[in-house]
Image: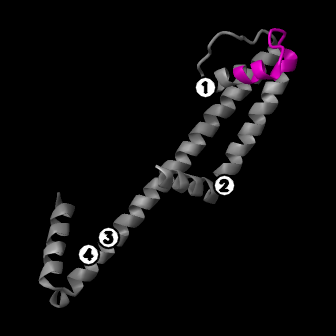
Amino acid sequence: MMKRLRLLKGVLKRTHTDRLISGFVVFFLIDAFLIMHVEPDITNYRDAVWYCYAVFSTAGFGDFVASTLAGRLLSILLTICTIMIVALVTGVVVAFYNDLVAMKYKASKAEVLDKLEHLETLSKEELTELSETIRRIRE
């Protein structure tokens, strides 16, 4: 589990998606601050963050509702940004994973082809292993 989290962290860093996520967190907190000031029913920052979380997660718990035009526009903006962030981060992770799988496939293919080119130098165990590898590829 930790290895996968480190891999994900590395992917996000290499693709600079971590900056995008950090920017979204800052936007989220600023949006909560603005919501607190424009919505009469939301009187403290903690409640504003909770409301923004409900908008962000699309859970819509209903304990707070935007009643002003400014609050509704800020909620819409937060929803649009959330959709874009989720789509971008998901796309980056999936693309990286596909590239990783393709690289592993190319590496194993190159290894098999190298062994096939040097059949006469392989031991009996290596030939058996190569045969099993080729059977797995065909399945």
Q: Position of residue 123 (x, y in %)?
A: 15, 85
Choose the circle earlier in sequence order: 1 or 3. Answer: 1
Nearer-the-camera pick, 68 or 61: 61
- As for residue 47 lying within the magenta part, the answer is yes
| C-alpha separation, residue under disc 4 versus residue under disc 3 | 6 Å
Q: Which residue is mark 3?
A: 108
Q: Residues within 10 Å of mark 1 (few under 14, many from 20)?
A: few
- As for residue 49 lying within the magenta part, the answer is yes
Q: Is residue 130 left or right of residue 63?
A: left
In the image, what residue type sits under mark 2? His
Q: Which residues are magenta?
A: 35-50
In the image, what residue type sits under mark 3? Ser
Judged from the image, the secondary structure of the residue bearing numbered disc 1 is loop
Choose the circle earlier in sequence order: 2 or 4. Answer: 2
Picture residue at 19% right of the left edge, 62% below the top: 136
Judged from the image, the secondary structure of the residue bearing numbered disc 3 is helix
Circles 2 and 4, Cβ within 8 Å, touching? The answer is: no
Q: Which residue is mark 4?
A: 112
Circles 4 and 1, Cβ within 8 Å, touching? The answer is: no
Q: Is residue 99 above or below residue 49?
A: below
Q: Which residue is mark 1?
A: 57
Picture residue at 83% right of the left edge, 26% below the top: 33
In the image, what residue type sits under mark 4? Val
| C-alpha separation, residue under disc 1 versus residue under disc 3 | 41 Å
Q: Which mark is residue 16?
A: 2
Picture residue at 30% right of the left edge, 71% below the top: 109
Nearer-the-camera pick, 49 or 2: 2
Q: Is residue 6 above or below residue 70?
A: below
Choose the circle earlier in sequence order: 2 or 3. Answer: 2
